[in-house]
Image (cartoon, helix red, strand yellow):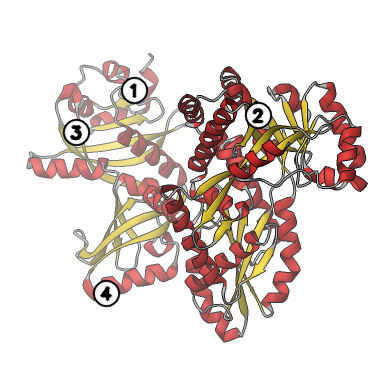
Amino acid sequence: MDLQPREQRYAALNLLHQPVWVFDIDLRRVHWANTAALQVWNAGSLAELCARDLGADMSPSVARRLAQYQSDFISGDVSFNEQWTLYPGGKPVSLTVRLSGHRLEDGRMGMFNEGRVQAAEQPESLRSVEALLHTAVMITLYGEHGQPLYRNPAARASVRRLDETLAERIVDPRAHAALQATLAETGLATQTLAVHTVEGQHWHEISARRCSDAVTGQAALLVSEVDVSAIKRTEAQAQYMALHDALTGLPNRSHIMQRFEMVMGRLREAGHEAALVFIDLDRFKDVNDTLGHGAGDTLLVEVAQRLRGAVRASDLVARLGGDEFLILMVAPDIRSEIERVRLRLMRAVAEPVHLLGREIHVTASIGVALFPHDGSDVQTLLRNADLAMYSAKEGGRNALAYYRAGMADAVESRTALEAELRLAFDLRQFEVHYQPIVEATTGRIQGAEALVRWRHPQRGLVAPDVFIPLCESTGLIRRLGALVFETAAHQQAAWARAGHGLRISVNLSARQLRSAELLPDLKQALKRSGADPRQLQLEITESMLLGQDDSLLSLFQALQDLHLGLALDDFGTGYSNLAYLQRFPIDTLKIDKTFIQGLDTNRALAELIVAMAQLMRLRVVAEGVETPEQLAWVRAQGIEFCQGYLFARPLPVAEFEALLAAR
């Protein structure tokens, strides 16, 4: 290293008795030092000192300070007076140092240091100075007019300009005024405010107190700042999550409650009306049960996006949870607005969704409660909209219903029925009826479909379309299904002992099919009943086969291992995918009654389905045969078996056995 040019350039400074040195900020090395500085640095020669790599053990805070100094020097003619502690050879040396900018020979900005060794000071004083210089807390002393008198390195690194005032630093002038008002009143203030920094707006917790400048004795303001932006972001995220649904990003129940309370007063003043629109997806549980919850979540996200697109920007679409959505709408004539968008809402949900390579169709049952006609508070309106939604669902689904008086009575009746339904298991009020399945050509009974009935002591025989959905919604369907299968298994064994080799079909629900308890339930029933599994058949619907996953194939293989038959029920009403018949071990195809009873319009399709089933060597059963003309068509198509009211309704065991004896 050739130090001669530096020696020549700075030779006059060697005459000074105080330590002076030039520091290369970029290289983290001393560029030159006079004799007094060599003593301070405990260096034997200039070459030795210049060869030291001072960046090797430099703390990040010191490195940031040096970079800030360099930036300040480049920006303008500035200098700083600070107390430093150097550690040559590991021994601390305290100095008061004046720092100023100095261009090196190659034009880079270095730092000129003029030091004065301090007399021995109290350890507390030295440590406090070191802490002030190294702390991440931003500390600034402002004059009485807001001008900065001193900034520690952390504060200097944060400001946009060295001469930035406190008023310029705080983003909101009103917040600055409030801070000054508190200081004028109490002399102390702590507030969390948005401030301008070199990195943009941040949130700082600012603590300020009135004081005096130690140099001039004039009034001053000592301000310390801590960056709490991360905490603010976390708080904002927590607030957002508290008011929004994590899956869809829609506002949640709490959000819509708050929003409605806020607008209620304005609604009354403006004479406007509002509506809570309660939306529930029909048969959404079937999607979860057949395709899995991941597919169900994807469907919910898609529906959420469609609902937002179907209404005005001013309308608030929220997700209550599960498959339930809510829309808050405001208009001068709210009923007209509902009628205007009802078709768009229905279509938005009914549009097919592609999941796992399948085209899925769902519909919506919608209930509407109007403000102020149906309630003056959000809780009442939400309850009434819910009641209206249940009315739409009970009316056949895929419909919209307005709340009307008396709906609460219907819900109370439903709740009472649910309690009685649970009790019905303990009181053994369920009984299984059997509808004959006959040979189409001879009318000879070959089997039966087991159908559950509820004989209520006061209500009489409760229709399945009343209590089956209730069982599904309450989770009782597995218990009911297990009961029906075991009853049918016992009956098959009893009829076999009596000389009737009848094959009994039992319906499975989607929930049963996906239940881990299905196989244990079936095995236990077979063991207890002594039934011949070859004479028992499980009926499933097309919608239950949507998730063609390995678990479903494994289940069907296990059913085959038990020698149980598998029938596809109501074929033609759903997806009519013949690939199901090849992929899954189905041995019986049941053609839905809508084809049989609507031959005038469905004849060609019905004949095609029959031909395909026969080609695949499947056992075919025609459902819903009620007239001789329908039976004639069944025979003409070569369909082997049929069932329907032409032969018999579902019958209790005694009546079924009487029919057996008569034939």
First in sequence: mark 2 or mark 3? 3
Q: Is residue 611 above or below residue 483?
A: above
Q: Which of marks 4 and 2 is in front?
A: 2
First in sequence: mark 4 or mark 1? 1
Which of 34 and 147 lies nearest the eye of the viewer?
Answer: 147
Q: Position of residue 149 (x, y in %)?
A: 30, 57
Q: How far apart are marks 4 and 2 (CA)?
A: 97 Å
**Left or right of residue 297, residue 204 in this image:** left
Q: In this view, does 49 lie above or below 658?
A: above
Indicate the amino acid at tag 3: His
Q: Which of marks 4 and 1 is in front?
A: 4
First in sequence: mark 1 or mark 2? 1
Indicate the amino acid at tag 4: Ala
Task: Please tell me whether mark 2 sits on a helix, a strand or a loop.
Answer: loop
Q: Mark 1 points at which residue?
A: 7
Q: Distance between the residues labelled 4 and 1?
A: 57 Å
* The residue positioned farthest toward the front in the image shown: 662
Which quadrant is home to the C terminus? top right
Q: Mark 2 points at which residue?
A: 502
Q: How far apart are marks 1 and 3 (CA)?
A: 17 Å
Q: Are marks 4 and 1 in contact (CB under 8 Å)?
A: no
Q: Position of residue 62 (x, y in %)?
A: 31, 35
Q: Which of marks 2 and 3 is in front?
A: 2
The residue drawn where x is 62% and y is 22% is: 534
Q: Mark 3 points at which residue?
A: 17
Indicate the amino acid at tag 1: Glu
**Left or right of residue 630, residue 203 in this image:** left
Q: Distance between the residues labelled 3 and 4?
A: 49 Å
Q: Mark 4 points at which residue?
A: 184
First in sequence: mark 4 or mark 2? 4
Task: Please tell me whether mark 1 sits on a helix, a strand or a loop.
Answer: helix
Q: Residue 587 appears in which quarter of the rendering?
A: top right
